[in-house]
Amino acid sequence: MARITRQTRRRWLSPFMAAAMGMLPAMVSAELESMSENELSDISGAGIGLVLEDFKFAHGTDVANGQIFKIGGIKSSDGQDVEIVVNQLYIAGAGSNYGETLSPVNLGRLVNPFTIDVVDGNDLGIGDRAVLSIAAPTKVSAMEGYDCLSTGATAGSGVCSSRPMTADFAGERPDIGLQMNITVGANQSSNLNIHAQSAVIDGSYLRLWGDSDRNQLAGEFKLNFYSPELSINSCSQDGSSCGSRIRMQDFALELALGNKFQPMFLDVDGTGNFVVEVQAIAKPAAGAIGADGLRASSDAATWDFYNDYYTNPELRSNLSIGNYSVGARDFGSARVEGMLIQYLKIQTQDLAP
Amino acid sequence: MSASICGRLPACAGFLALFLPVAAAADLSLLDDGALSDVSGQGGIYLSGDISINEMGGPIQNSYFGSCGEVGKKCGARLAYRLKQDGGWFVIDDIRGSFAFEGLTLRVRHVDSGFGGDGALFNRDVVELGLPNVVRYNDVQFKLAASSTARPTDPGFQQTDILSIQMQGDVTLEGNLLVFPTGNP
C-alpha cells in the first residue's frame, strides 16, 4: 500500500514541458510513501457499489433507419426458423406511457446501491467458501422503506429501498418494456408488447461459489420483481390496431432458485445440452426423526434443521397479482404462495433431426 | 476530440505544441508560483472509440473458422467456459461486428447533493463514467450455445446453438454510471 504524497517537478507548466514530460516519463517521478499500520487498519476489503444516474436505454428495430435487433437461431418443432424481431426494448423513467416518452431514471441509491462483492460464505450459511455476490439494492426496515408497489409510496410505508417518481425527482423505479414480433418460417406474427411500470427488483441477488464435492459452480438466485402494472397486448404489425390489453395490477414475484441447503447447479452435458439442477434436500439419517414426527421422539438438532427448512419464508417462492383484467373485464386477484423447490432438473433437448 | 480539449487554454496550447513545437516556443514564459496555484488539474478523460471484433474474420483458418466470405465457416470469436470438472462447455460463439461511441467520459466527482436527498447523506467521492448517449452498432452479433468440447476442432465436438443475437444501428445509452466502494473504506 502506498500513496502519492506530492509531485516534485511542478515548477514549470509550459507546453514544452508538457510535451517533454510525455516523452520522458521518468522525470515526473512522484514520491510514494508507505502507510502506517494505523492507516492500513482503517482499510477493509469491501465490494463496489454501482448507481446509474439519469439512465436511459433504448434499442429496437427500425429497418428504414438501419436499426436491427433480432434474436434468432431457434427452430420450431417442424424445423422452421423462428426469428424474434425486437421492435423496441427500453429501460427509462416512470410515466413513459408504454414507452412513448422516454425520460431518464436512477437505478440504485447511493445509500443502497447495486453491489458486486466477494463475501464470507460463513456469514451466509455456506461453510468456508468465498461467495461472489451480485446484488440489487437490499430491502430495508419498514420504518424507513417504501411500499414496493405503490407509485405514491412514502417513507415508512414498506420494505423496498427504491423510491417511486415524485414531482421533482425521477425516483429509482424504471419503466421496462419489450415490443417484439415472432416470425416462424415465412409467417410473421403480429406485435407482442410487454410493459412493466415502475418496476422494483430490490432484494434480488445472485450468489456464486464453488462446490468441492461436485467440483462444480454452485449458485443461489433470488429474483424479486414488483410492478403496479405488468401488461401484455398484441397489435397489428404497423401498430395501427391493438387487441385488448391484459393487465396484471400489483404484480409481485418473489422467486427463489437454490439456497444454502440446495444450491442450483448449471452444467452442459456430453451432447452439448444445457442442464439446470436444484439439489434435493438431504435426507435425515435413519431413525433421526421419530415415527410420530414430533421433536420429543427425534434427534433435536435434526428436527430443528428440518423445521427451519420447512418454515423459513426466505426459501420459498411467491407470486401475487392484485387484479387480473383483460380489456374492461376484471378477473380478481390471484396468488400462488409458499412454493418450495424439493428437487428440480431441467435439461434442454435438441429437436433438430 | 480536439474541439473539447481546446476549450481549456493551457491544454490546448500543449496539444498544438506537440505538432508545432518550434512556432510555439517563442511566446512561452515561466509561470510564477502565484499563477501556478490558480491552476487546478482538471481530472477527467474524454474517450471516443471504435471497437471491432472479427468484422471480416479472425486469424484462425481451419475446418471451422475462416473469413466471413466463406460459406459454412464461422468467422467470429469464440469464448468457452466450463462450470464443472469434466463437464460440458458454455459458449459465446461467432462474436463479431463493431461498435463505435463518442464522448464516454471518466472523472472523479464529489457527490453531496441531489439524488432525492441521498447526495447530502452520502457526501463522498465517486468515479463517474459518463455514458456516451449513443452507441453505434455495426452488424454486432453473437450466439449463445452449449458445447461438448472447448474447441470445435476437438474430437467428439457437438454443439447446440441456443440463440443468436444481432444488433445494428444506434442504441440509446444515456446517463452516468457511478462506482464507489461499499462498506467503510
Image: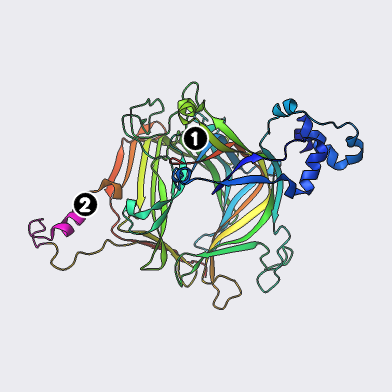
- Up-down relation of residue A94 to residue A351 (above or below): above
Which residue is pictured at 70% across the width and 28% down the height? B37
Tell me the crowding category of disc 2: few under 14, some 14 to 19, or many 20 or more residues within 10 angstroms, Cα based.
few
The span shown in magenta is: A290-310
Q: Residue B61's spot in the image, x, y percent?
A: 71, 71
At mark 1, the secondary structure is: strand
Q: Residue B149's spot in the image, x, y percent?
A: 54, 72
Location of mark 1 (residue): A175
> Which one is nearer the viewer's eye here, A350 or B150?
B150
Q: Residue A28's spot in the image, x, y percent?
A: 72, 45
Q: Residue furthest top?
A: A167
Image-quadrant location for residue A56: top right
Three-letter residue code for mark 1: Asp
At mark 2, the secondary structure is: helix
Label 2: chain? Answer: A
Cα distance in 3D space between marks 1 and 2: 37 Å
- The magenta stretch spans residue A265: no
Three-letter residue code for mark 2: Asp
* Residue A190 visible from this viewpoint: no
Location of mark 2 (residue): A308
Q: How many numbered marks are there?
A: 2
* Residue B5 visible from this viewpoint: yes
- The magenta stretch spans residue A295: yes
Depth check, mark 1 against mark 2: the one in front is 2
- Up-down relation of residue A193 to residue A213 (above or below): above
